[in-house]
């Protein structure tokens, strides 16, 4: 493959990673804003959907930026599924991503239940998972994209 084509593909992947990371950040801020609303029925369900969406976008941004040999978009136009993204990133990062991986697997299972049917109230359990996930996400975004969520929104 000619060097110019490789360079343009690499530049396109960097731009894609940047756009995905920006959208991931926005999805996480949306989850935090909804969680902090004083009256919001279906709070944990919506926050879970948004947190998983934020993570999926962040994982795809990481893959686009760091794993050029990995295809994000399939021939049929669909993208790499969430579980495959988690596994792919986990295999690259290793042990330091293990806690985030387990958190995401549990949260994703809850997400699938609420997305496709119904789950009895697990408020305090889901709150703990969401809180951990936001902290893992903040660290992940800073480490891999230089995005400091706590500075951008005065989060503590």
Image: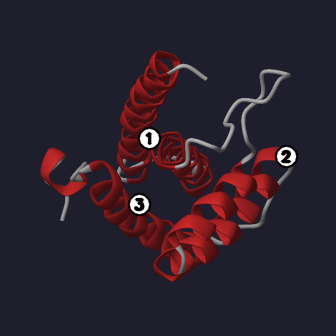
Q: Residue at x 47, y 66 (%)?
A: 133
Q: Secondary structure at mark 2?
A: helix
Give neighbour class at mark 1: few <14, some 14-19, many 20+ (Cα, 10 Å): many
Q: Nearer the viewer, residue 40 or 44?
A: 44
Secondary structure of the residue carrying tag 3 is helix
Give the vertical position of 136 relative to 33 (above or below).
below
- Which mark, by number, is residue 116? 2
* Residue where numbered disc 1 is placed: 24
Q: Residue at x 27, y 57 (%)?
A: 142
**Gap between marks 2 and 3 measured at Cα:** 25 Å
Identify the disc placed on residue 91: none
Looking at the picture, tell me which residue is in the foreground, 146 or 135: 146
Residue that appears at 58% across and 60% down: 89
Q: Secondary structure at mark 1?
A: helix
For disc 3, the marked residue is: 137
Discs 1, 3 touching: Cβ within 8 Å: yes
Residue 105 placed where, x, y %?
69, 68
Residue name at image x 48 percent, y 30 percent? 13
Which of pointers 1 and 3 lies earlier in the amino acid sequence? 1
């Amino acid at each position: 493959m000619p060097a110019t084509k490789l360079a343009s593909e690499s530049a396109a992947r960097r731009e894609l990673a940047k756009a995905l990371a920006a959208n991931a950040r926005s999805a996480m801020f949306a989850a935090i804003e909804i969680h902090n609303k004083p009256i919001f029925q279906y709070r944990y369900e919506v926050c879970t959907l948004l947190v998983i969406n934020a993570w999926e976008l962040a994982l795809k941004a990481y893959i686009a930026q760091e794993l050029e040999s990995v295809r994000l978009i399939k021939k049929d136009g669909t993208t790499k599924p969430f579980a495959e993204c988690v596994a792919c990133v986990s295999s690259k990062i290793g042990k330091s991503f293990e806690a985030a991986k387990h958190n995401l697997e549990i949260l994703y299972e809850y997400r699938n239940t609420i997305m496709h049917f119904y789950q009895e109230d697990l408020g305090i359990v889901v709150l703990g998972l969401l809180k951990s996930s936001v902290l893992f996400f903040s660290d992940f975004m800073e480490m891999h994209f230089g995005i400091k969520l706590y500075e951008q929104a005065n989060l503590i």
